[in-house]
Amino acid sequence: MTTPAAAARLAELVTRVTEHPNQLPTLFPAVARLVGRGPTDPADRDGLLTLRVEDDARVTLLAAAAGSGRLDTNQLAALLTELYEEGDGDERRAVLRALDRLDAVDPRVGRRLVEDALRSNDPRLIAAAMGRFAARHLGADAWRHGVLKCLFVGVPLAAVTDWADRVDSELVRMTADFTAEREAAGRTVPEDARRILAAPRPDPGPEPSEDPEHPQAREGER
């Protein structure tokens, strides 16, 4: 929970980055100290399903910078990349969470950050990477592997936005292989794996585009 004093400090920071977005790389690491840190939901202390206090503050600042009208698409892309690449795990998580709110972000830049996070073994990064942005813009193969990564590292399926809408036969096959391997090794199979296996499989629709000018383009048509 944020205090009135912390809320006031966040409001001051929002004003600063709205007027001077180039200050965000300096302010971003200091957010937890200035505004506070901790879970917004005591049952989700690591912020796998909900934004932690520091996540919410950082996402708010990024949204303010993006909405300031002072950054063009390339400048916003450079800012996101800098904050992610130079940040620690907490800061990277906030950048990934912010992708869900930044409609102006170049999808190619966002995909690059999401795919990097999915190569990690940090459940907090993986959960943040599989949000609304991934549901809208990640290609089918990368998205399926993201879901499997969630099963491997213990990220709840509830962290994967719109997973039930994107379940297909290939994901079910991959999940079945994962389940068989776990059972053969005498290891517990996550209940989420069984949910995928039991899920209805909708008719395949257009994959998310790699080309932001053609949002419904399929990979095979490029």
Image (tube, rainbow, N blue to C red):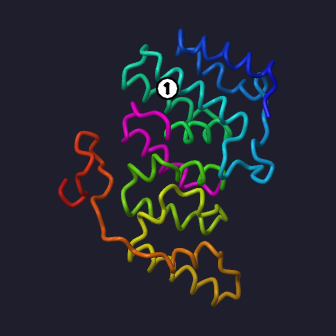
Placement of 211 over or under 27, stated as above or below: below
Q: Which residue is drawn at 49% across and 39% down?
A: 99
Choose between 80 and 48: the one closer to the eye.
48
Mark 1: few/some/many CA within 10 Å (<14, 14-19, 20+): many
Quadrant of image for the N terminus: top right
* Furthest residue in direction left, as rendered: 221
Left or right placement of residue 85 versus residue 105 in this view = right
Give the residue type that dot 1 points to. Leu
**Residue 154 lies within the magenta run:** no
Q: Quadrant of residue 160?
A: bottom right
Left or right placement of residue 185 versus residue 164 in this view = right
Give the total number of marks visible in the rendering. Answer: 1
From the top left corner, tell me how far across and down residue 145 is, in percent: 48, 64
Choose between 169 and 88: the one closer to the eye.
169
Q: Residue at x 61, y 49 (%)?
A: 125
Dot 1 corresponds to which residue? 79
Placement of 81 over or under 7, stated as above or below: below
Left or right placement of residue 159 versus residue 101 in this view = right
Q: Residue at x 60, y 39 (%)?
A: 92
From the top left corner, tell me how far across and down residue 86 is, in percent: 60, 32
From the top left corner, tell me how far across and down residue 25 is, in percent: 59, 22
Placement of 25 over or under 110, stated as above or below: above
Q: Give the range drawn in magenta.
A: 100-122
Left or right placement of residue 208 versus residue 143 in this view = left
* Furthest residue in direction bottom, as rendered: 184
Placement of 105 over or under 19, stated as above or below: below
Tag 1 secondary structure: helix
Q: Which residue is drawn at 65% across and 25% down?
A: 28
**Residue 118 lies within the magenta run:** yes
Choose between 163 and 95: the one closer to the eye.
163
